[in-house]
Image (spheres, rainbow, N blue to C red):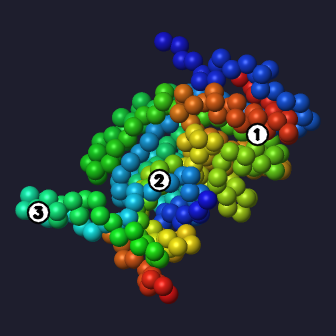
Amino acid sequence: MLEIPCPWCGPRAEVEFACGGESGPPRPADPGSLDDAAWTAWLWNRTNRKGPHVETWWHQAGCGRWFLLARDTSDDRVLASWPIGATPPPLPEEGA
Amino acid sequence: MARIAALARLDPAALAAPGADPVRLAEHSFRARLLLRGRDEALAAALEALGFGPAREVGAVARSGERRALRLGPDRLVLLDRPGEETALEARLAPLLGERGGAVVDLTEAMTTLAIDGPEPAVRATLAEGCPLDLHARAFPPGRCAASLYGKVPVWLEAVEARAGRLVVELHVDRSYATHLARHLALAGREFGFHFQS
């Protein structure tokens, strides 16, 4: 089980959280102007990268807040967490 | 209409386990419980109006006489008071929070409070059986609160007081889960002896 550092509550067990998936690119400002391929790409395609990866997590059973978490997908190490809108801490590059 | 405690139909004999100094479970069914939501500024205004000191940090508990305020998240506070106070508190806080973009909800009837009392190591071990929090005295001393789980049941925990080697912890839980939670606690506390006072 992962120990996830909630930016407000501190380190807590993974069972208290729900993962919201990869923190994707921003929603297009004018979705009506996109063609199907571009919309599909925004909606469904994720990088699925190996290495440091930023995800949204929800502290469902705790403080109830969403936040961002950087996790290395190759070894499951949790690198950092920060509130949505805050400046993310420096993260190691892929393969570093 | 008469109010009925959430654990009223639970048979104390069915939960009991022998022990010289057992873990004791009691229910405070009708305590006033209000959930306050809002930004820091709205919650601070509510705390000040009720005569509390600040409780800015998540996990802090503010006290004012019998009233307690648990800071369970950056945008949420739970207010506990004597039974019967909920209506007046809600009426007083609703405009105060409303003006500041916050809200207050009366959860008195929606939830109940189970209090666990006993020798400190036994109480902490009983809780640790079902709760993933760090329950060491360093991390969860009296005067701290946390929203977490017990088994699969969402609970709000508060370490209320420690005195002469004994610890009181209160678990605030949705009423419909209370019987299940009480049975789970009784199983977890069996090895230390368990006593339920209905």
Residue at position x 56%, y 52% in the image: A15
- Kindly report the distance in space between the C-alpha atoms of the residues bearing marks 2 and 3: 31 Å
Rendered image quadrant of residue B23: top right
Same subunit, tags 2 and 3? yes
Residue B165 placement, left or right of A8: right
Q: Amino acid at mark 2?
A: Ala
Give residue B106's position: percent from left, percent from top. Answer: 42, 34
Q: Is residue B19 above or below residue A94?
A: above
Q: Nearer the viewer, residue A41 or B111?
A: A41
How many numbered markers are drawn? 3
Image quadrant for the C terminus of chain B? top right
Q: Look at mark 1 in the image and give the residue it sits on.
A: B188
**Chain letter belonging to callout 3:** A
| Residue B76 appears anywhere in the view | yes
* Secondary structure category for the residue under label 3: loop
Instruction: State the residue at coordinates (48%, 66%).
Output: A7
**Which circle marks residue A86 in the picture?**
none
Protein chain holding label 2: A
Q: Could you confirm whether marks 1 and 3 are on the same chain?
A: no
| Mark 1: amino acid | Ala
Horizontally, residue B38 falls left or right of residue B109, namely left
Q: Nearer the viewer, mark 2 or mark 1?
A: 2
Label whose residue precedes the other's in the sequence (2 or 3): 2
Q: Nearer the observer, disc 2 or disc 3?
A: 3
At label 2, counting other C-alpha atoms closer than 10 Å, the crowd grade (few under 14, some 14-19, many 20 or more) is: some
Left or right? Give the position of B30 relative to B193: left
Give the numbered dot on residue A34: 3
Label 2 belongs to which residue? A18
Residue B69 versus residue B27: which sits nearer the camera?
A: B27
Looking at the image, which residue is at 65% across and 17% down?
B9
Q: Residues within 10 Å of mark 3 (few under 14, many from 20)?
A: few
Chain holding disc 1: B
